[in-house]
Image (cartoon, coloured by chain):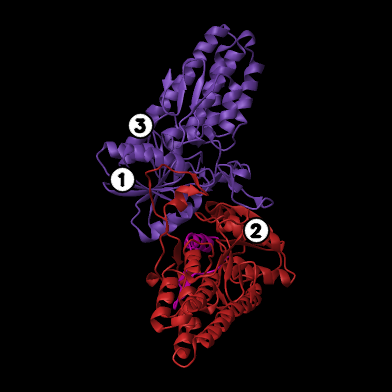
Chain colours: A purple, B red
Amino acid sequence: MISTITMKWDGKSLELIDQRKLPLVEEYVKCGTSDCVAHAIKDMIVRGAPAIGASAAFGYVLGAIENRSNLTLIAMKEVKHKLATTRPTAVNLFWALERMHSKFLELYSDKNENEVIEILKIEAEKIAEEDMEINKRMGNFGQELFSNDATVITHCNAGALATVDYGTAVGVIHAALDHGKKIHAYVDETRPYLQGARLTAWELLKLGVDTTLICDNMAGWVMKTRKVDAIIVGADRIAANGDTANKIGTYSLALIAKKHGVKVYVAAPLSTIDVSIQDGSKIPIEERSHDEVTQIRGVKIAPENVKVYNPAFDVTDAELVDAIITERGVLRYPYTESISKVFK
Amino acid sequence: MISTITMKWDGKSLELIDQRKLPLVEEYVKCGTSDCVAHAIKDMIVRGAPAIGASAAFGYVLGAIENRSNLTLIAMKEVKHKLATTRPTAVNLFWALERMHSKFLELYSDKNENEVIEILKIEAEKIAEEDMEINKRMGNFGQELFSNDATVITHCNAGALATVDYGTAVGVIHAALDHGKKIHAYVDETRPYLQGARLTAWELLKLGVDTTLICDNMAGWVMKTRKVDAIIVGADRIAANGDTANKIGTYSLALIAKKHGVKVYVAAPLSTIDVSIQDGSKIPIEERSHDEVTQIRGVKIAPENVKVYNPAFDVTDAELVDAIITERGVLRYPYTESISKVFK
C-alpha cells in the first residue's frame, strides 16, 4: 500500500493524480492495467523522472497480473517494452523497469505465478518507499547549501508530484524549512507545459514558502536586478561526467546564473545518473507535440500553419553545475570522479 | 489619410487593429476620442514603440478636435498628459507627443482653432508617414548584415504591427527577402503577452519566411544545437550609451547569444533613442498586471493566491549589442560615440 498525493497503490490498481489538470482540479485517474499506466506516462498524467520510474514499476506488476495465466518471459518482455517506449529522456523509467525485470528473471523459472506476482509487488513497493526515503535524505544533504533567507529560482516541477512524495529540488527546500530556514522562491512558469505555474507554485504555497511566479524569460532579469542565491532543479538523466538533462530552459538558466554568480544546484537520486552514458551528447532528447506550444489548455495562441520545435529537455554542461545533491551526499565537479566514487 | 494593417486614420477617427485578438480574429477598434486612444495604448490594443508613438499623435489631434471650442494651452497639456501616462517605457510615445505639443505651442496664439487643428493633423500624418519611410530605410541598411540562408531568432513583435507599417526588426527581414535572400526564423512566443506566437509568426508567415515557433526557454538550446546567425529585435528605449530596453527576455537572449557567437542586432528608429538618458539604469521599467501571467486568454494556469512579478521590459547592456540599425545607418559599439555622432 502506497498513498501519497502523487499516487495510490492498493496491490491491484494504481491511482495517479491527473497532473494535467492541477492546480485547478484535483482528480485521480485509476489504472487497473499496464496499458493504462503506459498511457498515463505518455500523456503526462504522471510526470517527473522519479514518479515515472515508480509508476512504471507498478505498471510492470499490473502487466504480470494480466498475464497470470501464462506468465512467460516473452509476455513480460512485451510489458517492459510497452512501458519503456512511453518517454525517452528520463532514465529512472528504464532503471525501474530493469530492476523489476531482473527480479522477474531471477524468479520466473523457480516460482509459480502467484509467488512471482507477490514478489514483484513487494519490489515495486520498495522502489516507491525507497524514493520517499531517498528524497528526505537528499533534502537533508541539500539544505546545508542554503542559509536562512535564501532566494532560489525553480524551474519545472521537481516536487512531491515529480516523485512518489517529498520531491527532489522542492524536497531540498522542504528540508531547509524543517531546519528553520526561511526560503524565497521565484518559480519559472515553465512553458509549454507550465509545470512551474501549475505544480511547483501550488506545492510551495502549501509548504508556506514565499513564492513569486515569473515567466521563464524573466529569470535573467531577476538575477540581474534582485538578490538570487541559487537555481535549484531536478534532473531527468545525468551522464557519467555530470552533464544534466532536465526540462527545456535549464541550460539557459544555468548559463545566465554563471554570469551573475548565482549557484546552480541539481537535486537527483542516484537512479537518475546513467553511468553508461559518458556525456550529455548521448542523451536522447524527446520532442513533443506541436499542440503543446500552439495551444494552452485548448486555447489557440498561434497561427494555424506555423511550424513548431518543441524539445522537452535540454542538456546543461557539467561545468555549469555547482553541485549535484544525491541521497549519498553532495557531489562536486569534476563529476566524472565524484560520480564514479559514489557508484563504487 | 493613413491606411495600413495596424491603423487607419481618416482625419476624424483612428481605427486600430485589436492586437489582443490576433491572429485568430482580425477586428478593428474605432477611436473617435483621445480617451479611447489612451485606453487603446494602455490596454495594448495597439502596442510596439513606434505604433504607440503614431497612435498618440493621432490621439493628440482628437484631443484638439474635442477642445475646438476652447483650444487652450491648459486643455492640450491635459490631453498630452493623459496620453503620456498610458505606458512608461517606450520613449517614442513621449517623443511623438512632444513633437505634437511643440507644434501646438508654435501655433496656438497666432492661428484660429480650425487652422491649428488642420496643421496638427498634417503633423500627425507626417509622423505616421515618416515612420513607414524610416522603417524601409532601416530595413535596407539592416539587410546588409544578413547573408542568404541566414537564420535569426526574433523576440516579441517588432513587425508591421509594432509600427505604422513594415516594421523595424521584421522590416529588416522583409528587406532581406526583397534583396532575394532566404531567411529562416525561430520566433520566441514571448510570454506573457505572446506577441511572438500571435503577431510575429503571423507576419513572417505572410511574408513567406520559413518560420518555426518556439517557447522563450528553448532559444538557448536552439543556439547551442542549431545554426543561428543572429538575434534581431526592436527596442522601446535606447539610452545615450546604447543600453537597450526591450521586451522582457531580450537581456537573457543577448547574454546567451554572446556565449554562442550569435550576433545581437537591434533595429530602431532614432526616435527610440533617448539621448537625455545616460544609461539603461535610468529607464523606467513598466510592471504589468498579474493576470497576464496567471491567465492565458482567460484560462487560469496558476494557483489563485500566488504572487507575481511581471516586468514588461528589461535592459540589455550596450556591450552585448553588436549593432543598432537606424534609418541613418548601422551604429556600432561604443554607442556613446556613434549615437552622439548621428544626433549631431
* Residue B311 belongs to magenta span: no
Where residue A127 sits in the image (x, y, percent)?
46, 24
The amino acid beneath tag 3 is Lys
Q: Amino acid at mark 1?
A: Ile
Q: Chain of mark 2?
A: B
The mark closer to the camera, 2 or 3, is 2
Residue B341: x and y, percent? 50, 86
Q: Are marks 2 and 1 on the same chain?
A: no
User: What kind of element bears circle 2?
Assistant: helix
Chain at numbered mark 3 = A
Q: Which residue is mark 2?
A: B202
Q: Nearer the viewer, residue A228 or B98?
A: B98
Estimate the spatial distance between the alpha carbons at disc 3 and disc 1, rounded to whole Å. Answer: 18 Å
B293 up-or-down from B129: above or below: above
Residue A183's disc is 1
For the residue marked with disc 2, what is the amino acid?
Answer: Trp
User: Mark 1 — on which chain does it sit?
Assistant: A
The stretch of residues the image draws in magenta is: B232-260
Q: CA distance from mark 2 to mark 1?
A: 42 Å
Which one is closest to the eye, mark 3 or mark 1? 1
Q: Are marks 3 and 1 on the same chain?
A: yes
**Which residue is denoted by mark 3 in the rendering?**
A136
Q: Which disc number belongs to residue A208?
A: none
Q: Nearer the viewer, residue A199 or B292?
A: B292
- State the CA–CA distance, disc 2 to disc 3: 48 Å
Give the image quarter of residue B26.
bottom right
Q: In what element is the residue under mark 3?
A: helix
Q: Is residue A237 above or below residue B248?
A: above
The residue depicted at 41 percent of the width and 42 percent of the height is B303
| Crowd tier of the residue under label 1, counting other residues whose Cα lies within 10 Å: few below 14, some 14–19, many 20 or above | many
Residue A173 lies in quadrant: top left
